[in-house]
Image: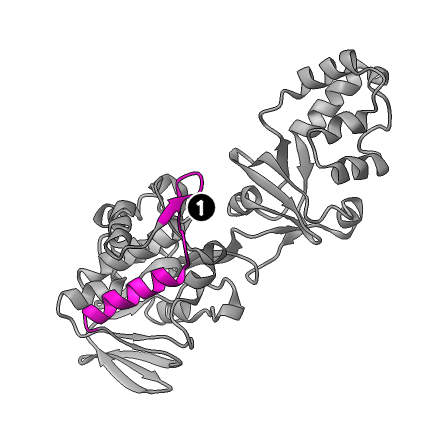
Amino acid sequence: MCALEAGKRGRKVLVLDHSDKVGKKILISGGGRCNFTNLEVGAEKFLSGNKHFCKSAFSQFTQHDFIELINKHGIAFHEKKLGQQFCDDSAQQIVDMLLNECSSSQVEIKLETVINSVTKDNDGFTVKTSKGEFICDSLVVATGGLSIPKMGATGLGYKIAKQFGLNIIETTPALVPFTFNAKDLELYDGLSGISFDAIVSCGKISFRENVLMTHRGVSGPAILQISSYWKSGDDIRIQMLPDLDWLAFLKEKRQTNAKQELKTILSDVLPKRMVQRFIDVGIIPNSIMAQLSDKKIRELVELFTRFTIKPNGTEGYRKAEVTLGGVDTKDLDAKTLQARDAAGLFFIGEVVDVTGWLGGYNFQWAWSSGYAAGQVV
C-alpha cells in the first residue's frame, strides 16, 4: 500500500522482501478468503500506548476507501458478521489487486532478498542485502511483528528501530489461544472440538463470540479477542449461552420435567460431551431435576454464568495472529509515520505499537498506515 501510493507520486520505489512469495499472511488470512477490513474501524478497537495515535492514518484512508479500491478491481465480497468483510472467492485477489496497483505505479519488487544491514549518511540510507546494495532517500520498515515465524516473521523491524534510537514497547503474542496446566488438561480431557456461544471477560473487558475447546486449552474468536488483554495469572470468566436465562430455565425444567435427568436437560442447550464430562468429574451433579434444591440451582447458574479458568499461558507467537507492542508511537509522527529523530525513516503496520481486534482491524491499520506514509516518503 505504501509502495503503490509513493509510486503514484512519481517516486522511484523498490520493495525488498525476504520471502519467496508476496503477501503470505494475506493469503492465509480469513481461512484463505482474507478478512480485509471491518466496517466498525475506530481507535477504540485498537491497543496502543497512545490510543489516539491511529486516528490520523484512519482519517486519511478509511475502511470505505479500501472497499472502493476493492470495487474498482471488481472483487466480490461479503460481510460475514460484526462488520467483517471477506472476499467471496480468494485472498489471492487482494494480493493481485495490490500487485496490479504497484505495477501501474512502476513499483519494483524483489523477493528472496535478505537484509544484512542498514546505515545512514549524507547520501541517505544504504541497505545491504543478499542481492546487492541499495541507496535511498526514504526507508520504510513494514516488516510486521513476530507472529507465525514459520511464515517468515522476524524481529528485523525492531532491530532497525533500536539501531536508530527508537524505543520498543515490550512485545507479546496477541489474538492467541490459551493453554491449560496439566491438572486442567486432565479435567477437560476429551472436549477438543467443542464450541459454544459465550461472553468472555478479563477484568472489565468482555467479548461475545464462540469459545472453542482444544486439545491444549481453549481458543475460538472470543478467546482470541480477550487474549490481547490477558496478563499471566489473570482469571478468564466465561458466561455460557448469554441469551439463556439460566435461573428461569432450570426452575422451569425442575417443575415441568421433574423426573428427567439434569444431564438430559443440559444436553439440549450445551454440547453433550461437555455435560457428560462435567458430570464425570463432579462439576455437575448426576441427579434428576426434582432433586435440585434452590441452592443447587443457584450454584449451577453461577457455574454457567461465571465459569472461571486460569490459563497456564498462551500458544505463543507460532499461533498468534498478531504481535502486541512494537515501535513506540511516541517516537513516530502520527500523520506520516516518520521517526521523529531520524528523517526519512518510517515504520508502518504491525511493527508499530498499534494492535487491532480480531476481524479485519489489523489489515485496515496496515492499509491506512501504509497510505499515510506513502503520501510523504
The residue pinned by badge 1 equals: 357
Image spot of residue 243 (x, y percent):
58, 25
Image spot of residue 189 (x, y percent):
78, 48
Image spot of residue 37 (x, y percent):
36, 49
In the image, residue 2 above or below residue 79: below
Instruction: Tell me which residue sits at (51%, 47%) in the image.
Output: 228
Quadrant in which the N terminus is drawn = bottom left
Q: Residues within 10 Å of mark 1 (few under 14, many from 20)?
A: some
Q: Please indicate whether residue 65 sits to the left or right of residue 158 in the image.
A: left
Image spot of residue 269 (x, y percent):
68, 29
Report the amino acid beneath label 1.
Trp
Whether residue 86 appears in magenta in the rendering, the answer is yes
Viewer-side residue, 176 vs 310: 176
Place residue 188 in its image quadrant.
top right
Is residue 345 in view? no
Viewer-side residue, 156 vs 79: 79
Q: Please indicate whether residue 183 sits to the left or right of residue 214 in the image.
A: right
Range of residues picked out in magenta? 77-106
Is residue 295 in view? yes
Q: Please indicate whether residue 111 sits to the left or right of residue 65 in the image.
A: right
Q: Please indicate whether residue 374 sits to the left or right of residue 208 in the image.
A: left
Quadrant in which the C terminus is drawn = bottom left
Whether residue 144 appears in magenta in the rendering, the answer is no
Which residue ends up furthest to the top in the rendered image?
255
